[in-house]
Every structure is written in C-alpha cells, then in structure tokens.
Amino acid sequence: MRKFGLRHQCAFGALAISLAIAPAAAQAQDTTGADAEEAQSVDSTDVDTGNVIIVRAQGREQALADVPVAISAVSGEMLEKSGVSDIRDLTQVAPSLLVSSTGNEANGSARIRGIGTVGDNPGLESSVAVFVDGVYRSRSGNALSELGPLDRVEILRGPQGTLGGRNSSAGLINIYTAPPEFEFSGYGAFTYGNYDAIKVEGGVNAPLGETIAARVDGVYFKRDGFYNDVVNNVKVNDRDRYLVRAQLLFEPTSDLSFRLVGDYSKKDEACCAATFVQPDFAPLARVSPGLDPFARPNGGPGLTSTSNPIVPILLGLGQDPRALTQSTFDRDIYVTPGRTYAGETEDWGISGELNWDFGNVTLTSITGYRQYSNNQASDTDYTQVDILYRAPGENAGAREFKTFTQELRLNGTAFDDRLDWLVGAYYANEKLQTRDNLRFGNDYGTFANCRIALAINPALANPSADNCLGANVAALDGTLTGTPAFGAATPLILAGINNLAQIRDIGGTGDVYNQTSENFALFTHNIVHITDTIDLTLGLRYTNETKDFDASFGNDNVYCPANRTLLSPLLVPSVDTDGDGTPDLAPLAGLAGGLIALSCQGNSTSELDGVSIADTRDEDEFTGTAVLSWKPNPDWLVYGSYSKGYKAGGFNLDRSALANPLALNPANLDTANLQFDAETVNAYEIGVKYSARKWGFSVAAFRQEFSNFQLNTFNGSVFLVQNVNGCDTDLGGADRDGSAATGACATDNVAPGVVAQGFEFETSLSPIRDLTVTMGITYSDTSYESNLVGRDDGSPLDPALRLLPGDNLSNAPELAATASLSWTPPIGNSGLSGLFFVNARTTGDYNTGSDLLYGKEQDGYTIVNGRIGITGPDRRWGVELWANNLFDVDYTQVAFNTPFVAPQQTYSAFLAEPRTYGVTVRAGF
C-alpha cells in the first residue's frame, strides 16, 4: 500500500475495459479546490443548449463551469437511473467519494480524497459534513437511510471552512429533496428483487391555490439479509425501513418564498454481521513470525488455522470450525446462541427556508430541528463463543441527537457591481446522549484464562475447565514439581486466575454519556471583480464551539477490584538488577498485569458503579478561503485557491480512555484523558476548466495538509482516539517501535501529520440529444508523514499505530474512477422511449484497517451497475430491469481486529453488498 503499484495499474486497466464495453456514470461535475456552499444542476433537454449546470456557490446563479469551486453536481434524474437511495450509493457517481459502515450503520463514514472520520465513536464529528435541504445532519451516518425523491446532490471536495463551517475539513455533501411545484402531479413505483426485496414508492404534489403548493412522498423498503445466521436460523443485514416526507411551499410574490419540510423515518433491522478474513481474500492474513501482528507474514498458515494458538481455544469452547475454514465471502455466520444484531433507528425533523429579495439585497434564513436515535444489539465478538455482547433494547450501544440549527445570510452588490458581498451568521445547539450495556459473555472468564495459559505454557491450556487449567494446575502449584511455578506469589497468581474465571455475564449495566455542543459563527464571502475577466474571492469565518460533557457509569464486575487488590503488589519492583540498592524489576509484573487487564478490560469495573464525571471545553477558530480566477475567454477558466478548514475537538465517549486498567484510580479520574484536539487543514489547489456546448472537462491539482488529524482505532480490546501530527526532525524509527515512551518531538518541530495530494480529471460529452457520457478520475496520495507523533505537544504516537508512518491512510485508494453512459432514444413515432444506463466505478488497492495491520488489505475492484427499460409517452409509465454489482464482485468495507481473539490477532470483515437485481414498474400523472 505504500506506492502506486501493479495492483493500481490493473485496477485502472479494469476500468478501461469496463468503459469499452459499458461506459459508466452520467453526472454533472466540476473540480476545483476553493470554498463553496451549494450548487444546483439543471439538466439540458436539448443538446443545442449544452450540458448546462447552474450553481449558486457564491451567492448568485452562475454556470458551474464559470465558478472556481470543488463540486460534483448530480441531477435527480441521474440519481434515479443510478439507483441512489442513500449517501453510500453516491460513490458510483463521484470518484473522490467513498462511504463505508462498520458495526452499526449509524457509524457510517464518508471520505473525500481519502479523508474522513474513522471509527464507531459518536464523540468524533464527521470530516465530511452532510446537509439535507440546507440543514446539518449531526453525523454522516445519519444519512444512511432512504432519501426519497431528490432534486440534486452536490459533493464539495476539499475543506469548506467559510460557508460550510466546522466539521467539513474534508468536504461537504449537500442533498436537496424534490420540492413542491405549482402543478398537480403524482407518481408511484413498485420494485421486486432478489433476496425477496420489496420497495414501494409514491407521492402526490398539489397546488393549494396560486401561492401555496404541497407535496407528500413516501418510501417503504423490505429485504432479506445478506448473512445467514446458521446457529439462530435468522437473516442478518436485512432491510425494513420507511420514510414519509411532507412539504409546503409559499410564494406570495416573486420576491418572497418560504419552504417548510417535515420528515419521519424508521428502521427495524438486524445489522451488522462479519466473517473471518481468510488468505484467499487477503494473502497476508497469516500467522506472523513470533505471533507478532506488526511483523509482515512470510507465507505460513492462515490466521484462523490451528497454527494460531488461540484457534484451538475457540474450537474447544464450541466454535463451529466451518466459520474458521470457509471463504471470507461465504455469508454463513456462526453467532452465540441467543445473541442478536437487532436494532432500531428513528429519525425525524422539521425545517423552514425563507428567501426574501429586497432588490439589491437578498435575505436567506434556514431553521431546522432534528431528532435522531439508534440502538443496536450485537454479538460483539463475532464468534460463536460467548465473549462479549450487547443485549437488545434502548441501551444497546445507543445514541440520541437533538439538534437545533439557524443560519442567516444577506448578500448583495456594491460599487457598481464590482463587489458581490455576502455576510451571515450560524448557530447550532446539539445534545448528544450515548448509552451502553456492553457486557462480558458467559465464556469470557474461561476464554481470558486460556489467553493467560497460552502465555505461561500452551500445553497447560484446557478450555473444558472453567479456569482453563483444570488438573493442569498441578504443574503450577508445585504438586508435580515440588516447587511452585511463581514462588511465594503462586497462591496470589492462582487466586487471580480463579477470580478471572468468575467473569461471566457481568460488566456494564448502563453507562450514560451526555454532551451538549453549542456553536456559533460569523462569516463573510465576497467576490471582487478586478477586471471583466479576473475575480478575487475572499472568505472568512469565525467559529466558537463549547462542549459540556458528563457521564455516569453502571457496572457489576466485582472481580476487577478483587484482582486489582490481590495482584497490584506484584507490579511493584522487588529486585535490584543494577546493584544501586533500589529495586527496579518486578519479575511477575507482566503476568499480574495481564490478569488485571483481562479482569478489568475497558475499565469495566464495579469501582465505577454510580460514579459520575463532568468536564467542558471551549475553542475558537478562524477559517477561510482566497481564490484568484481568470477567464481568458468565455469557454475557459483558470484558477488558484487557498482554503483553511476546521473540525471540532471533543470528548472520547468511552470509559476505556480514562486510563490504562492497571493505572485506573476510581477516586481520581482524569477527564483530560478523554479529550482530543480540533483538526485543521490548509489546502491549495490550481485548475483549468473548459466548457463548450457539447463537451467540457476540468482538471485540478490539490494539496491538503492536516494537523491534529483525528483517528479512532480499535486495537482488539478497546478503541483508541488520538490526534496525529508529524515531526520535522527524524525520529530514527522511534515512532515505529512498541514503546509508548519513545518517539517524542520538540513542540517547535511539530508539523502536519497527514497530507493528501493529487489531481482530479472529469469530462462530460453529449453528442446528441438522448446520449450522455461522462468520466471522472481521481488520483490522491493520501498518506501519513514519515515521522509521526500524537498531539501537537509532540507526545509520542501510540504504539498500536506504529505501522502508520509513511503509509497511505485506511480506505484511501490512490486511484478511483467512475464513468457512465445514459441513452434514452425515442422508439419510432410511438411516443415510447427506451432506457439504457450503465455506470462503473474502479477503485485501486487500499488497506481497510485504520491501524494498517497486515491482512486487512483490499485489492482493487470494479463495480458495474446497469438499468434497461421502456418508458411511455410523457413518462406516464415505465418498466425497468436493473442490477447493482452486476458481476457480483466480492469486496469488504472494513476489516478489523476480532475482539479479544489473540494471540495472534485474527481479523473479521464487514462485507459489501453482493449482486442485487430486480424489476421496477413506474407510473405517474
């Protein structure tokens, strides 16, 4: 993954082949790197007018090709042909975008140019902000649901720090739903597909007089799951969801309009299962030398073979061997009996947008209130052994958002139209609550003791015994040898082992985290027409963010404090190794520490039962943009831009971050350990665009430098949240060793830790009225710097991240390309028309694990979608046959460390969707 190599070239070749036989994704796109707010695509109905795209990116309507903003604008018609129903589907039409989800779809993450928020912690805000009808969605995963009929979608690339505001350090997705119109109309659609998929859509639009129009839309979708839970005989990763949206549009005059939107959606679905990663998919998913996952494997057996010492333990505790030997993409899963992935999501909101033209000044006001709630049960270890679970219910990994937002903008002209000015203000109040009931399963104590036994002597491991020793304890207590294995400390060690064995179905009884975020901002965005062909755009935004945090814990794990008390004396040095008279070695610290850590994993301890903590943080940031653009003639645009973006800091909503379990002091909890700093980015871009009536293209080169990059990584036991920075001095490999104490950098030498640089090329061709072909290619080298540290004080990088220096970010392929062909020819003079649509996306190789461990690699692949059909006169009816992932390509979304299954750590993967196909019947009036 370190260089653009053979696999990338093969992926590029695959796209070229797909274009030759089935050109892909028709869309209206533009590429630049400046700041932007919104864009509107207008489909051409006649090739003579060209492929016209109108944007309001700088406060007034202009042709997209004339505006230096980074945006892909996709029309509602194109989205319908592409089968887009949520933001994940947008990856087929936008090469710079990648969307994936992990253990809960609420954690879905969008990435642009390889940059996005990683991990399952809602305390981290999205790097790619999502707005629906101008209203901010609290996290990008909140938009992984049915969107209903759409007017258009804009994908803005690069930091959007002026008009997009905070939490858009990588980009922004603007989704505009289909608005009411002053014409009576209606539509309906029925879809049936494989996996017994049923989708029903319908809506009515009606004028309620000359000044008011109303619209109601609804979507219902139900489908069987892609995974087969063999143990519990249920399907997982199913669909059972619906959406209802109602709107009113009030236009009393041509200068005044007000749009009111209300929506409600609900999902009752089981998500998200995973399978073991096998070498047939990821060749490096093999046992490493010394069972060290940070050492590159050199051939050898697979991680799920019995050569990995933990695998016989799983088998001994009841794991079905088929789960360990089947292909990665065999979607049979083997879950603990009685455990479930059932979950529920509810999302609703109301918003109003006012636009009032006072002549030379226009007022825009957007007000929104939204509530979002989600809970998701899980067999959290993803094995048949009962190690870790969340019981279904309102506390199962739950999150709830209550968000109020208000934006005001004024824009106009001055100095004989030499200055186009815009000023505005923004306010947001977000209340976030997360609740968790994560507990150790019935097999945890035995499984954890087997890990201890493997560390002492693998021959002693006996998973049929509660303490994984049984009669083999005689080899440790001195019965066989006459000498206790751990000297005078042997009774303490054995007592600790027996305590650990009692950890069965205990742990969290209800942890609650509350975070209130209050954000306000003032901004201005101005265009100075220096000459008739040269413009200077200047934007500035001031943001203030305050976050108030509190948490309370519930826990019944009494064996953690028992072992902490019992074994902590063994952590104290008792041997003087250097003869200075001061003990400097604790011979049994590793074993005692391992017992304490496994007894208190994730700081799951009754010592925290009833304990509450609180903290607050406040931050201010200036962001902005500067763009110089030149139009040498009406068809060409040349520009250069600088922009600065910002993503708010916050709190890690996870008690495991309070301290290492060995150092946790329940009487003196340090909430500073939960905080992470704001992420900032400086971006530079140059580009050229050409636009003619039948053909246009754009090409841009960009460089983005991220400081305090926010990273969330699961290390197999807990989630780590860390800021990542670079160091201008050579650390001599100290950031790549296993020590948490080495690799510091002087504060003055701290530099950006992540750099994304590359180019984007996009083109669109409409040679005749009914034919449109487009293609886009993004090359982005999105990499960590060669010398890395943690926070901007120069503190060392966490050793769990020691493979990061100099490598590409996870889920950041260097190459991605999309293309499409859309052909809607008339069929004689019958009034009928045909439909032939195909799109394709090729993605180069990348590592899907945020820690970049070997065995989490994803080879390049190409996904092709297609749709053919026939449409009646005036689109009164239509019948379509469609297929997504036409060639049934297997690929993963994310590979991760299977919780607690070590040594050596095995990997599991959340799989992407297989081929789906079906028929859709439409009617309208």
Image (cartoon, rainbow, N blue to C red):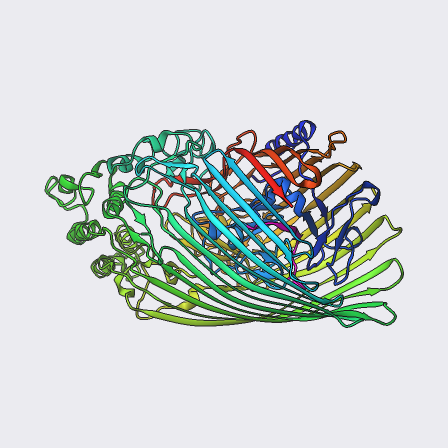
How many marks can you see? 0
Residue situated in front as seen by the camera: 592 or 35: 35
Q: Does the magenta stretch include residue 154?
A: yes
Q: In this view, does 533 lie to the left or right of 524?
A: right
Q: Where is residue 52 in the image (x, y as percent from the top left)?
A: 78, 48
Residue situated in front as seen by the camera: 677 or 348: 348
Q: Residue at x 54, y 53 (%)?
A: 143
The answer to whether 716 is drawn above or below residue 246 in the figure is: above
Where is residue 653, by image quadrant? bottom left
Q: In this view, does 3 lie to the left or right of 481?
A: right
In magenta, the rendered stretch is: 147-164
Q: Does the magenta stretch include residue 637?
A: no
Q: Position of residue 452 (x, y in %)?
A: 26, 45
Q: Where is residue 188 in the image (x, y as percent from the top left)?
A: 58, 44
Q: Position of residue 12 (x, y in %)?
A: 65, 33
In which quadrant is the N terminus drawn? top right
Q: Residue at x 28, y 65 (%)?
A: 609
